[in-house]
Amino acid sequence: MSASKNKAELAKKLGVSRSSLYYRPKRPKDDEALRDRILAVQTEHPAYGHKRIAMALKLNKKRIRRVMKKFNLRPRILRGRPTKRDDRGNLPTKVPNLAKTICPIRANVLYAGDFTYIPWDNGFVYVATVLDVFTREIVGWHIGLHHTTSLITEAFLDAVRRTGVAPQIFHSDQGSEYVSGSYELLLAAHGTKASQSKKSSPWENCYQESFYSGFKLEFGNPTRFHDLGELAEAVHRQIHYYNTRRIHTALKMPPVTYRVHQENKIAVLMTA
């Protein structure tokens, strides 16, 4: 009996057409093509997980997760354990947490500030940042060799210079730099109300906590830089990448793109 006749009889017994016995599913090829697209995204954004990759490719996140699992693809930079700054030696302030009472609907209403450290030359380099809670954009920053009030003051003034305005509210933790009398006077001079998290409650400044978690992860090992100038330049590049190219999961786009989108919506409403 010929092979063709055998397949015809087999198809008849199974109740399917003979042509279906020759079917080869397309999904393996589709998955391989998608794998290559995922790898291309990971090359540019090594810390992206399946959610951000799905946003970048405008595809369903479940499909991305399935293909990544199939080909054992993971973010090329993985998160470590977060470090915590201890402020238990300071007495709590009476500054209320105004940030939890409002939900800003435009930029320059609520800013959040914090700083982190980068190991360097048997010591540390400190990076202070100011984040607009509405746009999630880093609107000001400063780099220094000491975590003093001057470090966070310069970051705040940088934000005012870049945006052209001072925020209505500035939120921070109760680190000693933020509870110094000179910093409180700085906010008052700009007509900005102070807001602070409760002691030992980092989740009350979650916007900055989230930013630094990704920043330090993606910044990488600082020992690759030959001098302090290279390190400082890399910090500026990393903040620019976060602001302009890195998809924010809450916004589903980079912060600057979101800000411009919102500004355009307001302009349209005002001219309508």
Image: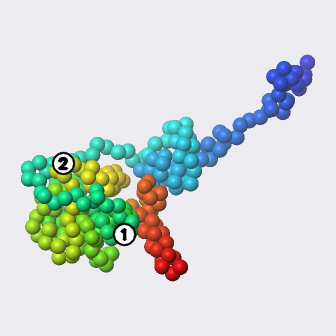
Identified at 18% across, 48% down, the residue is 200
**Is residue 52 toward the left or the right of residue 20 in the image?**
left
Residue 160 coordinates in the image, percent (x, y) = 27, 75
Gap between marks 2 and 1 measured at Cα: 28 Å
Q: Is residue 183 above or below residue 28?
A: below
**68 or 97, nearer to the observer:** 97
Circle 1 crowding by C-alpha within 10 Å: few under 14, some 14–19, many from 20? some
- Identify the residue at the far bottom of this view: 271
Residue 11 marker: none
Q: Which residue is disc 1 drawn over?
A: 107
Residue 34 coordinates in the image, percent (x, y) = 59, 47
**13 or 9, nearer to the observer:** 13
Identified at 22% across, 71% down, the residue is 192
Q: Which residue is disc 2 drawn over?
A: 200
**1 or 45, nearer to the observer:** 45
Residue 172 coordinates in the image, percent (x, y) = 22, 59
**Occupied quadrant, residue 102:** bottom left
